[in-house]
């Protein structure tokens, strides 16, 4: 039995390997290198019925229509990560137009909060007003929503 499927490695390691291969975001050669899997071990894995079953399950889970949003999110994040060194270099290139550098900095600031649902929710405060009325289980809840433009109230405070 190969090193990856040996009793010393947990099922979690094998599932992680199968999931990374199923996701097909990183080239297979890079995944095998990351997990220190030789060509010989990879050949053994491809013949191992347990691994083939795990890989098939992970491919099915990753490919399901219900997972479309997650696939797009993961692939987009991966592409952004690969782009970061180029973005960094262009931001520090004196030949690059300053407005482009500013836009790059804004992009990095947005990317820094990837997956920060709380930050996104805080940004939307004041943009919508919603009232929910629940009249019990026999009646469908009533919902009233109004989009509003944020207003700044200025004035002086009397002391």
Image (spheres, grey):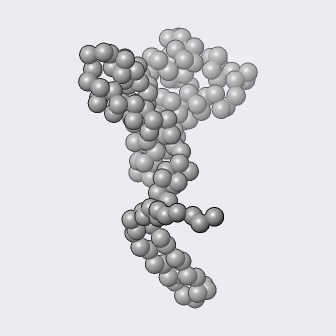
* Residue at left offset 29%, top offset 26%: 98
Up/down of 158 relative to 17, above or below: below
Instruction: Give the image location of residue 152, x and y in percent.
Output: 44, 61
* Residue at left offset 32%, top offset 16%: 93
In the depicted view, which residue is nearer to us: 83 or 9? 83
**Residue 135 visible in the snapshot:** yes
* Residue at left offset 40%, top offset 21%: 88
Instruction: Give the image location of residue 84, x and y in percent.
Output: 41, 24
The image quarter containing residue 133 is bottom right
Instruction: Give the image location of residue 40, x and y in percent.
Output: 53, 11
Q: Horizontal placement of 85 versus 20: left or right?
A: left
Q: Horizontal placement of 38 versus 72: left or right?
A: right
Up/down of 148 relative to 54, above or below: below
* Residue at left offset 50%, top offset 11%: 39
Residue at far right of view:
8
In the depicted view, which residue is nearer to us: 84 or 102? 102
* Image quarter in which the N terminus is found: top right
């Amino acid at each position: 039995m190969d090193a990856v499927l040996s009793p010393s490695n947990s099922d979690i390691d094998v599932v992680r390997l199968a999931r990374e291969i199923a996701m097909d975001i990183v080239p297979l050669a890079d995944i095998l290198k990351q997990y220190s899997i030789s060509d010989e071990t990879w050949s053994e894995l491809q013949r191992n019925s347990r691994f083939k079953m795990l890989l098939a399950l992970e491919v099915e889970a990753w490919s399901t229509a219900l997972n479309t949003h997650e696939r797009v999110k993961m692939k987009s994040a991966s592409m952004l990560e690969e782009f970061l060194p180029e973005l960094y270099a262009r931001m520090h290139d004196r030949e690059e137009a300053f407005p482009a550098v500013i836009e790059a900095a804004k992009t990095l600031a947005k990317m820094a909060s990837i997956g920060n649902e709380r930050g996104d929710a805080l940004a939307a405060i004041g943009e919508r007003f919603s009232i929910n009325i629940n009249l019990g289980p026999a009646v469908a809840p009533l919902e009233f929503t109004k989009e509003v433009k944020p207003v700044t109230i200025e004035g002086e405070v009397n002391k």
